[in-house]
Amino acid sequence: MLAEFKENLSSLIGNESFETAGKRPGILAAVSGGIDSMVMASLLYECNYKNFAIASVNFKLRGQDSDADQNLVCNWAKEHDIKFFNVSFDTISYAYKEGISIEMAARDLRYKWFYKVMDDEEYDFLAIAHNMNDSVETLFLNIIRGTGIDGVTGIREKRERIIRPLLRFSRAEILKYAQDGSVPYRNDKTNSENIYSRNRIRNNIFPEFQKINPSFLRTICRDMEYFKEAGDIIKDQYKRIRARVLEECGSQSKINISLLIFETHCRYWLYMLLDEYGFNSSQCDQVYDSFYGQPGKRFFSPKYMLVKDREFLLLFPRGDVKMDAGRDEAENYMICRPENGVEMVSLYECSLYVKLYMRTSDFRPIPSKETLFMDASKVEFPLTCRPWKDGDRFIPLGMSRFKKLSDFFTDNKLDIKSKEHQLVLSAGNDIICILGQRIDDRYKITPETVEVLEVKIN
């Protein structure tokens, strides 16, 4: 086992490249006092790896047993002249404060501390003592809870700065090594209690699998390697599809529905796309079912809002969307008649320029989305610039009847975000224009127009 461990370790840390650079990688070994981590520490010592240290965390969850675990690790490190780091945490208080489970709290606390020690002491790798059984257990837990392709590949031997040099050894092999080498360790009594899902799989289900196939662990591990290779193929295909259907514009993104639905297995590609934004599989199914429904339906992940528009799925960071304040509560801006012919107003996330001037014989208005022209003699100041409201209506240029703004936006295919941020200029109760869109027909330039009102938004 020692020779195989040494070979695994060398493969994981890229020993040759480090030694060529004139240094041997520093390893911080996370050791709890249990059999797996104590065997890992013993193997690091027995293979004469000089540049490693031990880090031990006391979570204060099992009273005197927790203290005894850490004392064992501390004493072993001193006996073998190994550098030792230790810390204690009030895990329960931290979990309560953060509103998370004790298991998640312990994970957060230990990894933050491990990385701090690594950075402060300049260690290259963090060694974690997961074994083959742990990886297979994780596979089944992920399947039970629901997972994507990554979830069926088990635990990775190496991920960034974390290495797991025991992952190719079964729990039985580790136990035999501990017994043969008289490696001290302490048993966590909770491992035999079927309170946790992992323990039920370990204590009840795996023994039955063992009866069916005595080598089932290695069989599953071989399959997980196949799953990983299949996952790499899928990810390559996903990258191509993602580039084709997803457009990212700063913090906002949109998925082209028509391009996506023509992809084979489009439901799965949708799942992978939305998984990046924190949406779960149930939400992905709901989004997929909304493809042929009416636009406007919204879905929320912890950090994003998704809006089903006509042609796109629009994704906005929730921090960019005012979730609680309605348009009616937003600030209105009063605009008086410009004394010097020009007025500039900073509003919301843009600027509005209001300009008054006499019409000349060569005046040729060229309206655009940003610039609109109106007959100033028909406008009563002060004007009000405000967000549009439900029930607002106007007579779009070129039409003779009133139209609701909501219908106008629908006809012009404005997405939900553009609708929410749309501003109007009103004179009294009349809307004279929708900024950046269209003027009211009643205020259009005619041959009789003497004074021009020009409004520009940018």
Image: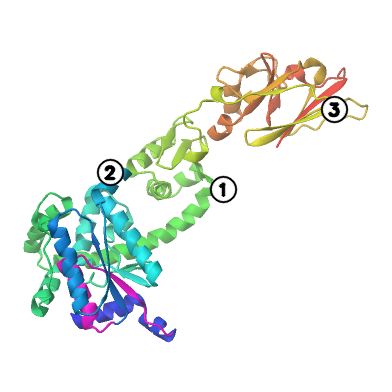
Percent position (x, y) of residue 126? Answer: 32, 69
Front residue of this view, candidates 392 and 16: 16
Percent position (x, y) of residue 303? Answer: 43, 43
**Circles 2, 1 touching at the beta carbon (< 8 Å):** no
Residue drawn at the location 23% of the way across and 57% of the way down:
138
Mark 2 or mark 3, which is nearer to you? 2
**Circles 2, 3 touching at the beta carbon (< 8 Å):** no
Q: Is residue 391 visible?
A: yes
Circle 1 is placed at which residue position?
A: 250
Q: Is residue 216 magenta?
A: no
Report how far apart the C-alphas of labels 2 and 1 lie in the structure: 36 Å
Q: Answer above or below: position of 46 versus 353.
A: below
Q: Answer above or below: position of 153 versus 398.
A: below
Query: Which quadrant of the structure image shows residue 298?
Result: top left
The amino acid type, in three-letter code, at marker 3 is Asn
SS at badge 3: loop
| Label 1 Cα crowd, 10 Å radius (few <14 / some 14-19 / many 20+) | few
Report how far apart the C-alphas of labels 2 and 3 lie in the structure: 62 Å
Q: Which residues are magenta?
A: 22-49
Residue drawn at the location 56% of the way across and 30% of the way down:
420
Circle 2 is placed at which residue position?
A: 96
Front residue of this view, candidates 285 and 383: 383
Q: Is residue 36 magenta?
A: yes
Query: Which numbered disc, 2 or 3, marks the residue that appears first in the sequence?
Result: 2
Percent position (x, y) of residue 58? Answer: 22, 59
Query: Which quadrant of the structure image shows residue 280?
Result: top left
